[in-house]
Image: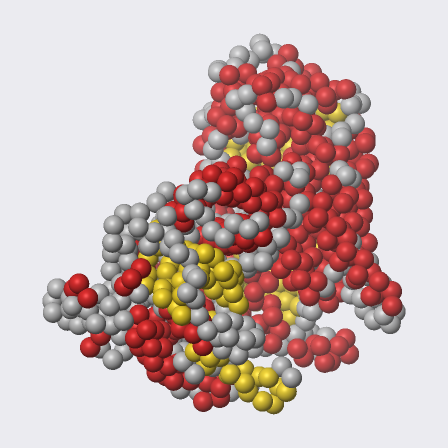
């Protein structure tokens, strides 16, 4: 009697000695109970007992089911709470507490999970110490005090609902058993259970006090006995019988990286199937391995199957429900306040939702919606909901008018409905809408290989979630908002099967013995009878998938303090046991495989069992069989059929600097005539495009032809520059309408007041995304709002600067456009707009280009005929061009235009910072001689710079620049888009976008 340890030589199936022990116990006690870790092992043991005609007197079950069964017989009428119910009650408990009541804890999913685990394991020690005959536990510190309060409150909630924790039930049963064990609790054997919680051990010790408890340990599990008292008797059941082990040496496969993983695994599995038709793949995550390897096996004529156990968050229903709930909560919290829009905009979750089959929408609608949202920072949540409703209505109408026999004709569009339900806090309605779409969609919407299985999983998960939020939550009197937080605990199961290509053609009339590879967990493989399959393949044998780590944290610390620490098998022994039993299932070959590097080429270290098994082979004096596979065969690694039937050719990739003749015509200076696509017409280039090309042809090609662009409307220098342009345009336009030709010292104050009014108007327009520029400036946070505020004093400084600059001139042309005027520059049609042209009474013009930047000196231009300090004369270079040519190009173009203005200056006007300034090139008569003379303040040299020996006048400068640019554009027409010899600032960005090419 009492607790005994029986050492066995068993692997998976019950040995004869174990069956005899249970049979003897049945005769002596009337009944015997065998505790195993899982229902799968329960079925294996039941079958073995039935084959030995012992099954009628032995109850095979798990520890949890054993306690629940005893409680149903001898309990007080309360029902044992389930894991989902426990988490739901804890979530409701936390929801009723404010932040001050649970401080220093926080109300988040992690805290709910921790409190649930503590309630499950330690409720008697904390909330019902009288059951254990103990005093009430005293907390150490504020965190423990809050935890104890929450656990006790949860105990009250359980009692009020007629529920009981399994740990409390076990503690009560321990007292009942101690008074006199019933027949069903006089003999209990524990087999292969790696972890026995404190309450289970308490009940087992009580049974041992009145009857007998047998702990059955195979050779790999015997370290578990070290946690028991040394006085406990140890008995050898079948020590004379050798344990079943794999007869032979395992083989080892090392794959260099993840890109070759699927192909390498498939090749080895195909080889194993060739030796024997029954092959098992064991892995820590079998579904992931199945996903990658099964299509490759199918291409080789091999079927495969895998059990799928999907949690709520792993299904499309769960992912979309969680993502939409999160973004809707953020949108509701932000409301219509534009300064809080940064918390949700651009809402990529909504675009992902439209891409999902569960929305009932198509990918084209998703792309259009995504572009519309991302390009407009002024959208409010209400506007987004209206947009969603518009897309849903359009799709619904289109399907109602389409042929009803089409696959998607009966699929409802619910993209707006689901979001609206979540907005109204109606999660059940949202899940019902998703479930309706999942049931109406054709299976191909979820994948062409196993779409019907995936569709069934989605429908089942949605239905299970609906049941949880309605029936379970209602029964527990928990609000839906609290119940929603525990949906991740839901799980649905299915069986996935990928048929071989041959099976797809032969069907069920074909070969009935089609080879099939089974994918399962290592624990499932360990339950296979010894020698029951031809080969075993263990995938991903690394420390990430098979770690040697104990569970540590608040729960384990608190359990040790309260004397309720579990008795568990150390991880190394547990892995050793599982590997030995799984490998023993193989009759002929066993292969262990791992990937040696991750996607970042970092080492992935082998699991401890890899090292142990290789060391065992070497210790026996044999050579370890290790096959190494690299990532060099790109076609075979990426193609599911391993490149079979594909023609392989080596291609030399041309860099973009070497455009072909056909590409030159369409990518460079010509385009198809919109009115006659068969004709090519010259492209219209703006001054900024021309400047970009002469600065760096490769950067021009990238920005103007490849045109990579950000998806989202921004809040950067470009948008701020657009805002400044709009303000300055509006200011001068309204001043002109009011009869004020320009800003002067006399009307400065009135102009500043007008500026402030204009600033507010333009700001309001930009907030509504209303602008003639390329992008509006819309603030999404308090910080961005301050940045907009900072622009006003900068523009006030600009207006003050204008009052004393270019006194004879007045703004005459604002945002003057060359598009459609037929003006040519350097022999090519010119387009684009000039920010501003100031004209005096004599018809002389100044081209002014606003630049919202502080480093205005970067736009300085010196007479190139003036020698530098080293004696070099820039003008001697026939290809000399200034760094910035945009204003010079427009100055020359004004002469060619219908305005026929006499351009005498090309200036850049810095508008950022507290010290605005104009820099660039002007005729010598407009350079400042003395402060306040009404010319260009701060500009000391002009064209020609006679004072320093310069001879190039402003007219000659414009001609020289045009001639040089004409030669540059001739090179462009010939296809020259090579990188600049001296990289500029933009080159640092553009040249990193993949211009290095490798042969393939």
Q: Residue at x 37, y 55 (%)?
A: 806
Left or right relative to 663: residue 887: left
Picture quarter with the C terminus: bottom left
Residue 775, quarter of the rendered image = bottom right
Q: Is residue 112 left or right of residue 664?
A: right
Residue 923, quarter of picture: bottom left
Residue 232 x %, y %: 50, 27
Q: Residue at x 68, y 64 (%)?
A: 363
Instruction: Report the coloring of the rendering.
Output: secondary structure
Q: Residue 379's spot in the image, x, y percent?
A: 65, 48
Q: Is residue 396 above or below residue 324?
A: below
Q: Nearer the viewer, residue 668 or 85?
A: 668
The x, y position of residue 852, in whole percent, is 42, 52
Q: Quadrant of the N terminus?
A: top right
Please name the residue shown 60% across and 28% down the image: 107
The front one of 251 and 292 is 292
Q: Is residue 7 above or below residue 611?
A: above
**Viewer-nearest residue: 947 or 178:** 947
Report the residue that reaches farthest toward the top: 135
Where does residue 487 sit, x and y in percent of width and height? 69, 40
């Amino acid at each position: 009697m009492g607790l005994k340890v029986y050492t066995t030589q068993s692997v998976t199936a019950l040995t004869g000695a174990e069956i005899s022990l249970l049979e003897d116990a049945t005769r002596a006690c009337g009944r015997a109970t065998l505790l195993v870790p899982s229902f799968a092992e329960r079925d294996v043991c039941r079958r073995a007992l039935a084959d030995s005609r012992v099954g009628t007197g032995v109850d095979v079950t798990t520890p949890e089911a054993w306690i629940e069964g005893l409680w149903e017989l001898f309990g007080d009428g309360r029902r044992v709470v389930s894991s989902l119910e426990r988490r739901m009650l804890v979530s409701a408990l936390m929801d009723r507490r404010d932040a001050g009541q649970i401080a220093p804890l926080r109300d988040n999913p992690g805290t709910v999970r921790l409190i649930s685990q503590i309630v499950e394991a330690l409720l008697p020690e904390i909330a019902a110490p009288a059951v254990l005959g103990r005093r009430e536990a005293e907390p150490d510190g504020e965190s423990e005090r809050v935890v104890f309060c929450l656990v006790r409150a949860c105990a009250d909630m359980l009692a009020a609902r007629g529920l009981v924790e399994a740990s409390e039930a076990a503690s009560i049963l321990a007292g009942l058993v101690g008074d006199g064990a019933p027949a069903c609790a006089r003999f209990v054997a524990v087999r292969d259970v790696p972890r026995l919680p404190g309450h289970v051990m308490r009940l087992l010790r009580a049974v041992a006090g009145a009857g007998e408890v047998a702990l059955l340990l195979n050779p790999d599990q015997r370290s578990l006995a070290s946690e028991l008292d040394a006085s406990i008797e140890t008995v050898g059941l079948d020590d004379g019988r050798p344990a079943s082990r794999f007869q032979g040496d395992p083989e080892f496969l090392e794959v260099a990286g993840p890109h070759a993983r699927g192909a390498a695994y498939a090749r080895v599995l195909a080889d194993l199937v060739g030796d024997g038709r029954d092959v098992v793949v064991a892995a820590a995550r079998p579904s992931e391995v199945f996903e990658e390897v099964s299509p490759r096996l199918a291409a080789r004529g091999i079927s495969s199957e895998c059990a799928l156990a999907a949690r709520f968050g792993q299904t499309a229903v769960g992912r979309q429900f969680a993502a939409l709930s999160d973004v809707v909560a953020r949108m509701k919290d932000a409301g219509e306040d534009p300064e809080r829009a940064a918390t949700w905009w651009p809402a990529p979750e909504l675009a992902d939702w439209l891409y999902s089959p569960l929305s009932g929408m198509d990918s084209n609608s998703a792309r259009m919606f995504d572009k519309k949202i991302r390009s407009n920072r002024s959208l409010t949540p209400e506007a987004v909901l209206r947009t969603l409703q518009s897309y849903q209505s359009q799709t619904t109408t289109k399907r109602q008018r389409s042929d009803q026999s089409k696959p998607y004709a009966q699929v409802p569009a619910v993209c707006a409905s689901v979001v609206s339900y979540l907005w109204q806090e109606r999660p059940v309605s949202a899940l019902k809408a998703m479930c309706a779409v999942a049931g109406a969609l054709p299976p191909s919407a979820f994948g062409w290989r196993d779409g019907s299985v995936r569709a069934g999983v989605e429908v089942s998960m949605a239905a299970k979630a609906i049941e949880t939020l309605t029936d379970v939550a209602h029964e527990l009197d928990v609000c839906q908002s609290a119940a929603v937080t525990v949906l991740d605990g839901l799980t649905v199961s299915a069986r996935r099967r990928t048929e071989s290509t041959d099976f797809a053609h032969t069907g069920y009339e074909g070969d009935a013995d089609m080879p099939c590879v089974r994918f399962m967990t290592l624990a499932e493989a360990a339950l296979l009878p010894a020698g029951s399959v031809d080969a075993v393949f263990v995938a991903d044998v690394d420390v990430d998938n098979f770690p040697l780590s104990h569970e540590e944290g608040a729960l384990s610390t608190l359990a040790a303090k309260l004397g309720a620490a579990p008795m568990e098998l150390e991880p190394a022994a547990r892995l050793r046991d599982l590997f030995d039993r799984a490998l023993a299932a193989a009759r002929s070959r066993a292969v262990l495989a791992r990937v040696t590097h991750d996607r970042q080429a970092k080492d992935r270290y082998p699991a401890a069992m890899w090292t142990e098994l290789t060391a065992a082979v070497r210790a026996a004096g044999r050579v370890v069989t290790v096959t190494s596979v690299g990532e060099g065969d790109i076609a075979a690694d990426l193609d599911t059929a391993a490149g079979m039937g594909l023609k392989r050719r080596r291609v030399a990739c041309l860099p973009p600097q070497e455009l072909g003749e056909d590409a030159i015509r369409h990518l460079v200076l010509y385009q198809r005539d919109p009115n006659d696509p068969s004709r090519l017409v010259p492209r219209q280039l703006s001054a900024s495009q021309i400047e970009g090309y002469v600065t760096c042809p490769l950067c021009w090609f990238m920005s103007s032809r490849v045109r990579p662009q950000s998806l989202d409307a921004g809040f950067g220098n470009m948008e701020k520059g657009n805002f400044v342009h709009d303000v300055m345009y509006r200011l001068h336009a309204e001043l002109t309408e009011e009869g004020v030709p320009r800003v002067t010292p006399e009307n400065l104050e009135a102009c500043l007041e007008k500026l402030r009014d204009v600033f507010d108007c333009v700001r309001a327009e930009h907030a509504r995304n209303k602008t003639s520029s390329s992008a509006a400036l819309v603030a999404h946070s308090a910080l961005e709002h301050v940045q907009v505020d900072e622009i006003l004093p900068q523009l006030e400084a600009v207006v003050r600067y204008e009052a004393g600059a270019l006194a004879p001139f007045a703004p005459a042309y604002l945002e003057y456009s060359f598009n459609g005027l037929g003006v040519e520059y350097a022999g090519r049609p010119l387009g684009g707009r000039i920010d501003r042209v100031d004209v005096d009474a004599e018809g002389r013009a100044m081209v002014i280009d606003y630049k919202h930047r502080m480093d205005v000196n970067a736009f300085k231009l010196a007479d190139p005929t003036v020698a530098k300090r080293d004696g070099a004369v820039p003008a001697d270079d026939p290809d000399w061009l200034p760094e910035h040519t945009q204003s010079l190009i427009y100055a020359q173009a004004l002469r060619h235009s219908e305005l026929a203005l006499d351009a005498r200056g090309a200036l850049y006007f810095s508008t950022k910072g507290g010290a605005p300034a104009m820099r660039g090139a002007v005729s010598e008569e407009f350079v400042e001689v003395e402060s306040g003379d009404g010319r260009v303040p701060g500009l000391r040299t002009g064209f020609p710079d006679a004072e320093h020996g310069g001879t190039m006048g402003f007219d000659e400068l414009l001609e020289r620049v045009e001639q040089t640019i004409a030669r540059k554009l001739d090179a462009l027409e010939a296809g020259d888009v090579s990188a600049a010899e001296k990289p500029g600032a933009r080159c640092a960005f553009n040249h990193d976008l993949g211009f290095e090419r490798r042969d393939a």
